[in-house]
Image (spheres, coloured by chain):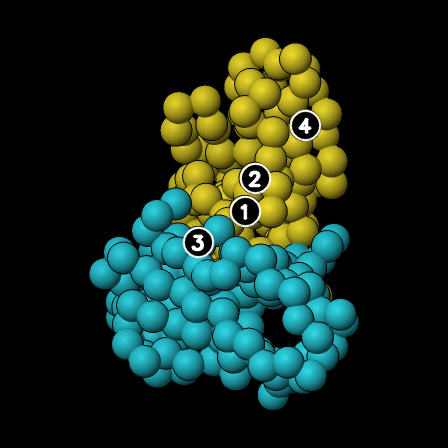
Amino acid sequence: ETGVTQTPRHLVMGMTNKKSLKCEQHLGHNAMYWYKQSAKKPLELMFVYNFKEQTENNSVPSRFSPECPNSSHLFLHLHTLQPEDSALYLCASSQEGTSALLVNTQYFGPGTRLTVL
Amino acid sequence: SQQGEEDPQALSIQEGENATMNCSYKTSINNLQWYRQNSGRGLVHLILIRSNEREKHSGRLRVTLDTSKKSSSLLITASRAADTASYFCATTTGTASKLTFGTGTRLQVTL
């Protein structure tokens, strides 16, 4: 579990607040991901970064803003969130390559439990 | 619609029994993985099976894949209370490297 760390582990914020979630991976991977996990719903992929470049944005509202300053760090900046954004936010990393046969095993952090009041 | 759907949604067994969970998917895949999640924590990779494989073992875990039926099963033998968790299947398709997760099976192992 220490391969990917996330802070904070719990966050309570009002709808007008601005906060940031942080993720750090110590595995030397070149890809990082943000997922949202809500009750009774499949894990939703939000953003993907390969080699620090954003390669996927799954129609995520602009109140979520990702930042990847280097291949080891990933942030999710939050502003003017809604109560329905309350969820567990998971960060993951993997080692990507050019071969379609390359296995994409992802390593997850413990998550940040976000509550929006 | 989601790629993977697990069945059953919830499973309760006694310690020592075997637990079987199933996953169905809709499109052709490169590989299928199973992950485990303890309550409110991150996911942990358990086992991967490639599209050209039919069965794989890892310790007390046995995974099967039937590409003709687009389904996979995860068997946990001789279950323990510590196996209590949610189990998810995840697939990769085409040249995309992203994983698509199912809704998960919640396993409860009681003493």
Q: Which chain is cyan?
A: A
Three-letter residue code for mark 1? Arg
Q: Would you identify the image quadrant in which residue A101 lies?
A: bottom left
Identify the residue under disc 4. Answer: B108
Q: Chain of mark 1?
A: B
Q: Nearer the viewer, mark 4 or mark 1?
A: 1
Which element type, helix, strand or loop, lies under badge 2?
loop
Label 2 to label 1: alpha-carbon separation: 5 Å
Label 2 to label 3: alpha-carbon separation: 12 Å
Report whether residue A115 is seen.
Answer: yes
Q: x, y percentage for residue A8? A: 50, 61
Identify the residue under disc 3. Answer: A108
Q: Chain of mark 3?
A: A
Which element type, helix, strand or loop, lies under badge 1?
loop
Identify the residue under disc 2. Answer: B38
Three-letter residue code for mark 4? Gln
Identify the residue under disc 1. Answer: B41
Q: Residues within 10 Å of mark 2 (few under 14, many from 20)?
A: some
Q: From this view, report whether residue A24 is shown above or below residue A78.
A: above
